[in-house]
Image (tube, rainbow, N blue to C red):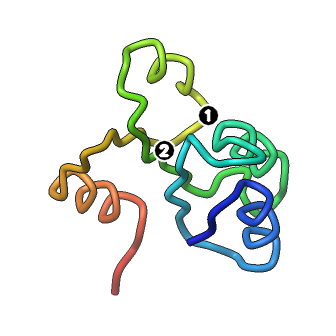
């Protein structure tokens, strides 16, 4: 877990995450911009990135289409989160 978009960028480049849960409202660089930057890298072009946000308005969700692989609003529905994790992570 990181606290800013810049730290998220650095951490993602240092590691090869199987899945990223992305907060939209990060300081310095928001989650939308960070996701756009990650999508331009070979490592994260097709890796699952899921928005996790309190931005639950229809316009917020519509503006994120095509950027994230899924979109979860807060407060989190744990069963929905578990379904998403199962969908994107192959647990053996």
Query: x and y percent of residue 55 in the render?
Result: 42, 30
Q: Which of marks 1 and 2 is nearer the N terminus?
A: 2
Q: Residue drawn at (64%, 44%), measured in percent from left and top? A: 31
Residue 28 position (above or below residue 55): below
Q: Which element is circle 1 on?
A: loop
Whether tag 1 and tag 2 are in contact, CB under 8 A, the answer is: yes
Horizontal placement of 84 versus 24: left or right? Answer: left
Residue tagged by mark 1?
Answer: 67
Foreground: 55 or 66? 55
Query: x and y percent of residue 61 in the render?
Result: 44, 23
Tell me the tag on residue 51: 2
Near mark 2 (Cα within 10 A), the count class, few <14, some 14-19 or many ≥20, is: many
Q: Which element is circle 2 on?
A: strand
Please identify the quarter of the rendering in which residue 92 is found: bottom left
Q: Residue drawn at (15%, 56%), measured in percent from left and top? A: 79
Please identify the quarter of the rendering in which residue 81 is found: bottom left
Q: Residue drawn at (24%, 62%), measured in percent from left and top? A: 82
Residue 45 position (above or below residue 8): above
- Of tags 1 and 2, the one toward the viewer is 2
Foreground: 60 or 40? 60
Q: Residue drawn at (70%, 76%), measured in percent from left and top? A: 16
Furthest-left residue in this view: 79
The N terminus: image quadrant: bottom right
Inter-mark Cα distance, 1 to 2: 9 Å
Query: x and y percent of residue 47 in the render?
Result: 62, 57
Residue 64 position (above or below residue 38): above
Please identify the quarter of the rendering in which residue 73 is found: top left
Residue 69 position (above or below residue 10): above
Foreground: 49 or 7? 7
Tell me the tag on residue 54: none
């Amino acid at each position: 877990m990181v606290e800013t978009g810049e730290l998220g960028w650095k951490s993602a480049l240092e590691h090869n995450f199987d899945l990223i849960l992305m907060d939209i409202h990060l300081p310095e660089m928001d989650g939308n911009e960070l996701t756009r930057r990650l999508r331009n890298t070979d490592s994260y072009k097709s890796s699952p990135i899921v928005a996790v946000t309190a931005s639950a308005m229809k316009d917020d969700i519509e503006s994120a289409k095509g950027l994230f692989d899924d979109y979860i609003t807060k407060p989190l529905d744990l069963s929905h989160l578990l379904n998403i994790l199962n969908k994107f992570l192959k647990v053996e």
